Amino acid sequence: MRRVSIEQPAAFRPRTITEVLRPATADEVVEIVRSGRRPLHPISTGYNWGLGSGLPVSDGATVLDLSGLDRVRALDLERGYAVVEPGVTQGALAELLRGTPRIFNLTTSSLRTSIIGNSLERGVGVHRARAEDLVGLEVVLADGRREHVGWWPGTSAVPRPHGLGPTLTHLFTQSSFAVVTAAVVGLLPRPEEVRVLPFTFAGDDLADAVDVLRSWTEQRLIPPTTKVYNPVAAQLDGYLAHVCLSGAGEVVEALSSVLLGAARHSPLVAAPPADEVVRATYAGDPDPADTWFQRRTMGCPAERIDAELGLLMFLPIVPFSGEAVTLTEKLIRDCCPSTPAVTVNVLDSDAVDHVIALGFPAGDPSAVIEARETLDRLHQAFAAQGFLAYRRDVDRPGAATALQARIGQALDPDGVFAPGRYAAGG
């Protein structure tokens, strides 16, 4: 077990941290939990950029850095699952699957990010929400017991996340009720063909374009995985939408023809094909150079983000309608001194999330203050419309409901785990 340090991102209030421990095995995690060190704040790789990275909510915590638990414990291509530890990155698993009949649901973030960390945060992959990837969890409870929830290898022949009786897996997502030391994640069949159709449209056509994309999604012409980039994020004069089609080659070809024909009667303009880096991400093939991610970080690698870049993130859920998305664009203009990069992720036929990235010079104190004030305005303006953030940062944690607090008290009566950004652990 090694003692290490932790980066303090410029955008957030500095925390007083008692110590940082880096165990190498789940058994060492059990020893730490039983040792009486408290409160414990577990992190995976700590790359939760824009939300506090590896920082705890409160001062005085012992950070439990789980990046040293980096084994893929099991890989079953026939039944479509992998058992991974918190230090396993999405790039590592995707590389392991290269050339196999399975792929993993990648995100457009760095390949160095943790699968478990992002899944417990309920992040969004290019094929589905990361929470849907979770099949089962191994957790260490406050009393040091190691338990399995959901489905675990050896319990039944078919991986099914819900099993029998109450489903407990998501008791441990966005919570601080335990330490997660491993997860069973589902793997997707590798499609015969993957094609990403880019469409552009003007800002004046935002509402109509979004309604067209919703209609296509409702009628199952396209999967609920479309991404829409504002001009800053797209680095274009207008908006850019990526529609991914995958499956049998004949089906992809037929759907492409239908969509391109339908687009001629809409504000959507077919653009040149997406480049190979974008297509490969949807195809589950990792790019060792992290090209797509570094395009958005001005070339800054993952391990230097907190030291070199200032970043705050705001991630609200919004109705999937042209009217609602147009309203969010107005709220962003009203709240932000300059237009930030915004990515809209389709979640299903009724909802989209917004990833609003507020970048600023990390070494400029006045820029830090302005970014924090901008984020406060965004939270207030969106909340007034009922558009709430689905992920919180360490300076703006969500309050636990009465029932969540009761569950936390039952699982962790002595406060072994530090309060989290969502529901307190006791």
Image (cartoon, grey):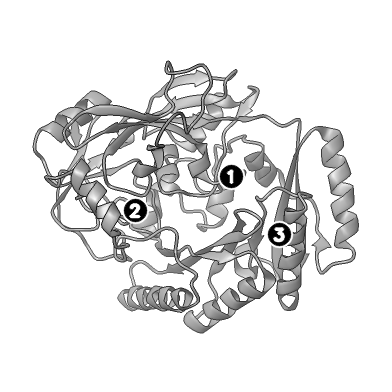
Amino acid type for the residue under numbered disc 3: Ala
Nearer to me, 2 or 114: 114
Q: Residue at x 40, y 44 (%)?
A: 120
87, 130: nearer the viewer? 130
Q: Residue furthest left?
A: 36
- Read off the residue under disc 2: 53
- Given residues 254 and 107, the one toward you in this image is 254
Q: Position of residue 274 (x, y in %)?
A: 74, 50
Q: Earlier in the sequence, mark 3 or mark 2?
A: 2
Q: Earlier in the sequence, mark 1 or mark 2?
A: 2
Query: Is residue 207 visible in this depiction of the protein?
Result: yes
Label 2 element class: loop
Q: What amino acid does circle 1 point to?
A: Arg
Give coordinates of residue 223: x percent, y percent.
Answer: 70, 48
Which of the numbered marks, if any, corresponds to residue 259?
none
x, y percentage for residue 122? 46, 48
Total numbered labels placed on residues in the image: 3
Instruction: Using the image, determine if residue 331 lies above or below residue 322.
Output: below
Q: Gap between marks 3 and 1, in whole Å?
A: 17 Å
**Three-letter code, disc 2:** Ser
Of callouts 3 and 1, the N-terminal one: 1
Q: Nearer the viewer, residue 292 or 146?
A: 146
The residue that appears at 58% across and 36% down in the rendered structure is 286
Element assignment for label 1: loop
For label 1, the crowd category at 10 Å Cα-Cα, with few meaning under 14, some 14 to 19 and many 20 or more, is: some
In the image, residue 114 above or below residue 327: above
Q: Residue furthest bottom?
A: 334
Which residue is labeled 1 in the image? 128
Identify the residue at image location x=84%, y=67%. 266
The residue that disc 3 covers is 241
Which numbered disc, 3 or 1, marks the residue closer to the eye? 1
Q: Is residue 415 left or right of residue 48?
A: left
